[in-house]
Amino acid sequence: MIDMKQKILLFLIFSAQFLILTAQHATISYEVIDLKSGEVVASQNPELCATPASVTKLITTATALELLGGDFQFSTYIETNGSIEAGVLKGDLIIRGGADPTLGSIHLGDRAFLDYFVKVIKQNGINRIAGDVIIDPTCLDRCAAPVKWIWEDMGFHYGAATFGLSVYDNTSIITINSGDFGTKPTVTSVWPETPNLAIYNEIKTLRIPNDSVWAFCPPYGLALYLQGGMPANRNNYAVRTSIPNPPLVVAKSLHRMLNNFGIVVDGTYSVQTEYFPENRTLIYEYKSRKLREIIRLTNFKSNNLYAEHLFRRLGNIIMPHEATSSASIQVVKDYWKKQGIDISALFLYDGCGLAAQNAYSAHFLNQILVHMRKSPNWDDFYQSLPRAGREGTVGSFLYKTKLQDNARLKSGSLSGVQCYSGYIMYGDKEYAVTVMVNNFTCKRREVKNQIEEWLLDIVK
């Protein structure tokens, strides 16, 4: 328990250090809560809304655990709208998505999942498909990217959009070779193949030490523009861009693989764009890893794609079909309001924190941290946060200090934004802490150093 003198001392130390950043026009919101007593032991502008960046993933993962549970698994369904007679599927083969972010994922998925799908189809006695191969991603609506995301992000892997059926982390690997200065680099390979996508290579070979390649392509786009510069004489340089239409990638790939493995498909491939009820027979339900593993990857790696799929899947709670981002926002707000947390100052536009318009206070996020400490899902949530100085995006933060391994924190950063939120467990002390700094003009490393000092002062 911190006595009043210690509390005043902490406040003075924090305030004095923050004045350095305040003088440089920074906006600051921080709060430290003693989890045992419930007391606020240090704060400044705790109710001030600030841009949170990726600490938003704590809201998403906490809500998902509370509403879905750690054992929850995403499902992808192999279905048909016809019947199987003498080895012939008289109807269409349908792959219905369930917003699984791990399908074919390099992290928690099976890259060869389509091989498994073909095996399952064969095991069900299907040697020929008299209809089409149809992908049904309509558990989510067609607005695949949050409306507040910006153009410069959406062409890259970290800004990949969210679909009812996503694949391979919605990431395309484009390999580029550059020659001598003044020549034009060449695109040598693209994986996976996206049907009908035209690539416009406008990259130049420049006298620069590192690439400055930009990728521009919206969801469902048919043109990918590569601009910027490459250093000379680079071979097999990989640029990770977003896949503009993952359901279409799966449709064509599966159609080709079925024919290659001896299952003749009479029809073509397509993607269903609107939900419509029809009689379907389930052939197989393909399940993801459990939610506790998914949120651990989400918070450890600050994975935007996983977070957005968790967020959008929450919308299915109130909209089973064609769920909107607005539905997801409503589910999040309704849940935390029912827990007694004031949501009037919560401005939420996505689930990962990439939208710069997201805004809320350190106090709001701390209230969620306090709630999760008492939740049956506490262990899953706590273990999803990387240990400072050891793991994930905070592997170098608080390194070789007394809080290494004793703080589990989620970091968040955008241009002019640096935030940390999580727990400090040091000796018999337990704290929930959120620090949000916006619009700083000093170097980011200086901000991180000061935040490290503030956190270390807490456990003096």
Image (cartoon, rainbow, N blue to C red):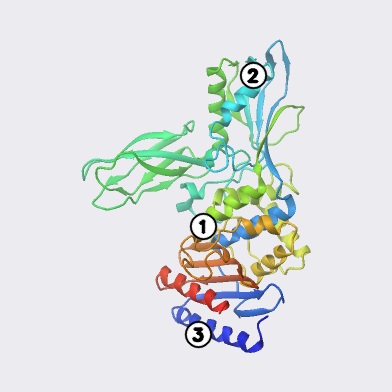
Distance from the alpha carbon under mark 2 to that under mark 3: 69 Å
**Category of crowding for the residue at label 1, using alpha-carbon neighbours closer than 10 angstroms: few (below 14), some (14–19), many (at least 20):** some
Question: How busy is the neighbourhood of tag 2: few (under 14 within 10 Å), some, or many (20 plus)?
Answer: some
Q: Which residue is drawn at 46% across and 62% down?
A: 396
Q: In the shown orientation, is residue 238 left or right of residue 141?
A: left
Quarter of the image with the C terminus in it: bottom right
Helix, strand or loop at mark 3: helix
Callouts 1 and 2 close, C-beta under 8 Å:
no
User: If you read the primary sequence from the N terminus, does the residue marked by circle 3 or circle 1 appear first?
Assistant: 3
**What residue type is disc 1 on?**
Glu
**Residue 145, visible in the rendered structure:** yes
Residue 175: image x %, image y %? 37, 38
Number of numbered tags placed on the structure image = 3
Please name the residue that numbered disc 3 is placed on: 16
Q: Which residue is drawn at 46% across and 39% down?
A: 172
Say whether disc 2 or disc 3 marks the residue closer to the N-terminus: 3
Q: Residues within 10 Å of mark 3 (few under 14, many from 20)?
A: few
**In the rendered view, would you say 396 is above or below 235?**
below
In the drawing, what numbered circle is on residue 391?
1
Amino acid found under the numbered disc labelled 3: Ala
Q: Is residue 242 above or below residue 124?
A: below
**Residue 278 appears in which quarter of the rendering?**
top right
**Residue that label 2 marks:** 122
